[in-house]
Image (cartoon, rainbow, N blue to C red):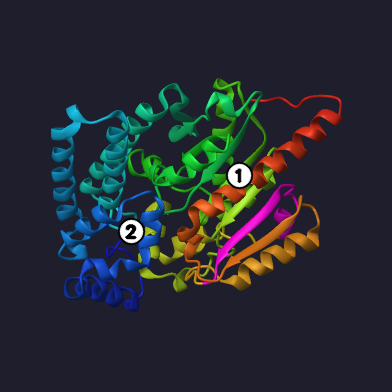
């Protein structure tokens, strides 16, 4: 159970709590234990019927990898038996459902294992099959080599009718227990609004971590900039004025990316922590994932690593020129409203950005997962406005900045 129990970073209370939760899951049921995550899972376009059946098939959290894989294999066999008679749209829907089901089997907070990586491969492969069928040549799987290891990304392009000129870009930077395939709903909403959408598994994330072993570096921001630079193979995409949709930890790193890359025109910050340096206060399941993606096993390692997971550096914040919209949930158990208020006020006081606002959903959870559609559609309009302003300024300056 690597990175869940065999590590020095967990306190005595962590060990007691983790054992209690695993034991309790057999008494009250996995369905009840995991209820706080349902909004997030449904936000990924996962249907409630499959979710209910999946959770009912698992006796306890310790059985999740094996019984989850058994359930997945049964669903795969069922789809394969029906595939020949399916319409194209039905096949796409089933492949997308199987992809997210496989993602659930390797759920981010579970310990690293061969079963976890096998489930992730199913998740990735079903996703690719679905998107190639749905988008044809407007979907691409990208490999970006960075510092000796590959990063992997999914690229969706909009319908040609939605753009008569350069295509503006949205980059989705997700969190520490996500995989890029989980964010299909966001990809589709931004693509339907006319954007090229790049969703990345950077070092320490998803495929790049699970299959290639790249842990999360202190210069993660530079990795994301390198991924944007790699879009030179797609000359129709305009990387000038690109927007970042930062989710959870991705929301925090969005600011660091914007501080080093002046091309960033807008930021949507969804649940980004302001300061993750208080490692001992993290819930045990987050400590588990924290240790996995950073490759740490001791408290000393943890203290050294977490210094990079904070954005209270006013000098860094003063370099940001992008428009910023912070969207936060009043019931977020991980990131306080006070922290996000501090961030808004600090950015406003610095006066360097293209505007800052904070929207609070009083009943919103972490990253406001129950409001995916509303938030992305509003963000798309704001991203376009910021992009048009950037393009207008670029034209008025008498020259056109390079595009990717």
Task: Give me the residue at 22% from left, 64% from top.
Answer: 61
x and y, in percent, of residue 400 in the image: 78, 25
Q: Which residue is mark 1?
A: 380
Which element is circle 2 on?
Answer: loop
Dot 2 or dot 1: first in sequence order is 2
Residue 131 vs residue 251, the one in the foreground: 131
Q: Position of residue 266 (x, y in %)?
A: 67, 46
- The residue indicated by pointer 2 is 109
- Let me know if residue 80 is in the magenta part: no
The stretch of residues the image draws in magenta is 314-330
Q: Position of residue 157 (x, y in %)?
A: 51, 29
How many residues crowd mark 2 within 10 Å: few (<14), some (14–19), many (20+)?
A: some
The residue closer to the viewer here, 371 or 223, is: 371
| Residue 325 magenta | yes
Q: Is residue 189 left or right of residue 267?
A: left
Number of numbered discs on residues: 2
Which quadrant, please, contains the C terminus?
Answer: top right
Q: Residue at x 77, y 39 (%)?
A: 389
> Is 271 left or right of 93, judged from the image as shown?
right
Q: Real-space Cα distance between discs 2 and 1?
A: 31 Å
Question: Where is the N terminus found, in terms of image quarters?
Answer: bottom left
User: Residue at coordinates 27% horizontally, 70% vertically from top-left?
Assistant: 32
């Amino acid at each position: 159970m690597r990175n869940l129990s065999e590590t020095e970073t967990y306190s005595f209370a962590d060990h007691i709590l983790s054992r209690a939760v695993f034991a309790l899951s057999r008494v009250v049921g996995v369905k009840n234990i995991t209820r706080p995550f349902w909004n997030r899972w449904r936000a990924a376009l996962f249907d409630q019927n499959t979710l209910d059946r999946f959770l009912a098939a698992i006796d306890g959290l310790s059985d999740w990898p094996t019984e989850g894989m058994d359930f997945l294999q049964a669903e795969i066999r069922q789809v394969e038996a029906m595939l020949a008679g399916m319409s194209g749209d039905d096949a796409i829907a089933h492949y997308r459902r199987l992809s997210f089901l496989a993602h659930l089997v390797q759920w981010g907070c579970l310990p690293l294992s061969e079963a976890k990586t096998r489930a992730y491969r199913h998740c990735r492969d079903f996703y690719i099959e679905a998107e190639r069928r749905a988008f044809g040549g407007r979907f691409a799987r990208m490999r970006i080599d960075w510092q000796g290891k590959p990063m992997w990304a999914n690229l969706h392009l909009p319908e040609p009718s939605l753009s008569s000129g350069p295509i503006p870009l949205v980059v989705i930077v997700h969190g520490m227990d996500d995989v890029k395939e989980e964010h299909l709903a966001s990809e589709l909403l931004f693509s339907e609004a006319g954007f090229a959408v790049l969703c990345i598994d950077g070092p320490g994330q998803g495929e790049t971590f699970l299959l290639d072993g790249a842990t999360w570096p202190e210069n993660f921001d530079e990795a994301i900039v390198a991924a944007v630079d790699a879009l030179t193979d797609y000359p129709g995409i305009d990387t000038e004025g690109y927007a970042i949709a930062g989710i959870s930890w991705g929301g925090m790193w969005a600011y660091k990316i914007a501080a080093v890359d002046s091309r960033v025109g807008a930021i949507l910050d969804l649940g980004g922590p302001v300061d993750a340096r208080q490692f001992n206060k993290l819930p045990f399941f987050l400590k588990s994932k924290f240790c996995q993606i950073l490759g740490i096993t001791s408290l000393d390692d943890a203290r050294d690593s977490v210094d990079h997971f904070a954005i209270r550096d006013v000098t860094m914040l003063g370099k940001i020129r992008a428009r910023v919209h912070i969207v936060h949930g009043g019931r977020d158990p991980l990131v306080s409203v006070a922290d996000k208020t501090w961030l808004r006020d600090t950015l406003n006081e610095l006066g360097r950005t293209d505007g800052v606002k904070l929207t609070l959903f009083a009943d919103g959870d972490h990253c406001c997962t129950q409001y995916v559609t509303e938030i992305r559609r509003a963000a798309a309009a704001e991203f376009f406005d910021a992009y048009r302003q950037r393009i207008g300024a670029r034209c008025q300056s008498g020259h056109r900045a390079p595009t990717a």
